[in-house]
């Protein structure tokens, strides 16, 4: 059983064994992350392969002090997925966005509003999440579904953690506002 | 900021959205060629594009000699015999004609002229002579016969008719030329490599710094 360090060293040397081991160990994780945003399995598989090819090519840029190997792979996959989705369906920013964030709501208020356990609200939220731009959907997935810490999400998305927290707040507020309008 | 929001409704919505996420159809394989993309090109592969380029240049700059006449419409000039003329530089007919320098008949003639003049005793001392010294060995006896056979004229249908070589059309001849040029380049390149290695080895034996070799072939 090779350690991450050994795998990275092996890939740096261009050894096939190291590449195989890295691929075998992380392929499911990367694929699962991509397929949540790219429902077409063939596209998701292709993006997964591209992620690894890119990782092998730029393995010299990997810094073990900054992140784990899986997080670094997720960062690459995130970029590739976003680029792919941008090409497929351009992001449409709704007009409501600007008006929504002007309303000031506290985090506690939002948390209460988004934790009712009401079945109808949950179903409505399912729809609303799917209407969000790709980047926001991925951010929510990292935060709520994968349960990643903000610092790690910031690394994957190449964003500042504080800016990311603000962005998350805005997404939640937008969802809350829409729920309110719908109800 | 480290404390996470509960937002149970949102979590549940996301969980349901991803509940039916499709799985991989077939176990993914590491794409072949990934290794090649990541590894730098091997050093020994460097001369290949250079050789290919030099062959191409050599082919383009190769002296064409007599150009084949431009193909005329068939109604005017059906098939031009000159097109199938052999390449001048090869001259196959001449090369197969017996050369004067060989003179096989001459040499046998001179041997024949010398043999009868040798005294019997001298002939007996030769290795071809019999041990008892009586008579001549079958080989010695056969020499005059051989000489006689040499003097008999070769029938025309066997000896005089020149060997007809298959004549290559110019396009194929050009391919042959190109192939020969490629072979010559490869041999030259191998020789250059061997020379380098030999120099390095010799310098190593003498304890000197290996000399920077002059390029025989410059790509």
Image (cartoon, helix red, strand yellow):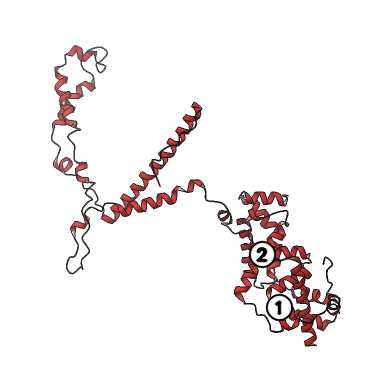
Q: Label 1, secondary structure: give it.
A: loop
Q: Which mark is residue A132?
A: 1
Q: Nearer the viewer, residue B7 or B139?
A: B7
**Crowd rating for badge 2 (residues with CA inside 10 Å; few <14, some 14–19, many 20+):** many
Q: Which of A45 and A169 is in front in this view?
A: A169
The residue at the point 84 percent across, 72 percent down is B6
Q: In this view, does A77 lie above or below B39?
A: below
| Residue B31 left/right relative to B10 | left
Q: Position of residue B91 (x, y in %)?
A: 21, 46
Q: In this view, does A112 lie above or below B69?
A: below
| Residue A134 left/right relative to B56 | right
In which quadrant of the rendered image does the N terminus of chain B lie? bottom right
| Residue A144 left/right relative to B54 | right
Which subunit holds the residue at mark 1?
Answer: A
The residue at the point 61 percent across, 66 percent down is A46
The residue at the point 19 percent across, 62 percent down is B79
Instruction: Check contact, mark 2 vs mark 1: CB within 8 A.
Output: no
The residue at the point 72 percent across, 52 percent down is A4
Q: Is residue B62 above or below residue A176?
A: above
Which subunit holds the residue at mark 2?
Answer: A
Which residue is disc 2 drawn over? A77
Q: Label 2, secondary structure: give it.
A: helix
């Amino acid at each position: 059983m090779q350690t991450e360090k050994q795998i990275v060293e092996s890939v740096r040397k261009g050894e096939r064994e190291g590449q195989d081991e890295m691929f075998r160990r992380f392929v499911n994780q990367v694929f699962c992350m991509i397929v949540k945003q790219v429902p077409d399995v063939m596209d998701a598989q292709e993006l997964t392969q591209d992620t690894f090819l890119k990782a092998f090519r730029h393995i010299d840029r990997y810094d073990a002090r900054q992140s784990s190997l899986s997080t670094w792979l997720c960062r690459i996959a995130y970029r590739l997925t976003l680029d792919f989705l941008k090409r497929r369906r351009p992001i449409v920013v709704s007009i409501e966005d600007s008006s929504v964030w002007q309303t000031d709501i506290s985090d506690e208020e939002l948390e209460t509003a988004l934790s009712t356990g009401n079945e109808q609200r949950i179903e409505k939220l399912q729809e609303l999440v799917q209407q969000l731009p790709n980047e926001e959907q991925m951010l929510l997935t990292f935060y709520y579904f994968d349960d990643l810490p903000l610092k790690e999400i910031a690394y994957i998305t190449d964003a500042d953690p504080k800016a990311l927290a603000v962005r998350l707040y805005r997404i939640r507020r937008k969802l809350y506002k829409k729920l309110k309008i719908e109800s | 900021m480290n404390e996470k929001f509960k937002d149970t409704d949102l979590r549940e919505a996301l969980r349901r959205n991803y509940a039916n996420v499709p799985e991989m159809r077939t176990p993914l394989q590491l794409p072949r060629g990934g290794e090649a993309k990541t590894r730098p090109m091997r050093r020994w592969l460097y001369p290949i594009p250079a050789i290919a380029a030099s062959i191409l240049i050599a082919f383009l700059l190769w002296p064409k000699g007599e150009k084949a006449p431009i193909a005329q419409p068939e109604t005017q000039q059906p098939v031009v015999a000159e097109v199938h003329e052999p390449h001048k530089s090869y001259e196959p007919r001449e090369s197969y004609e017996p050369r004067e320098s060989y003179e096989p008949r001459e040499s046998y003639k001179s041997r024949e002229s010398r043999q009868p003049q040798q005294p019997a005793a001298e002939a007996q001392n030769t290795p071809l002579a019999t041990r008892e010294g009586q008579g001549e060995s079958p080989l010695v006896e056969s020499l005059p016969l051989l000489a006689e056979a040499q003097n008999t004229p070769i029938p025309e249908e066997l000896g005089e008719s020149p060997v007809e070589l298959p004549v290559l059309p110019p396009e194929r001849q050009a391919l042959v030329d190109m192939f020969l040029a490629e072979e010559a380049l490869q041999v030259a390149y191998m020789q250059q490599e061997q020379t380098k290695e030999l120099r390095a080895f010799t310098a190593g034996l003498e304890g000197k710094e290996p000399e920077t070799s002059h390029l025989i072939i410059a790509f």
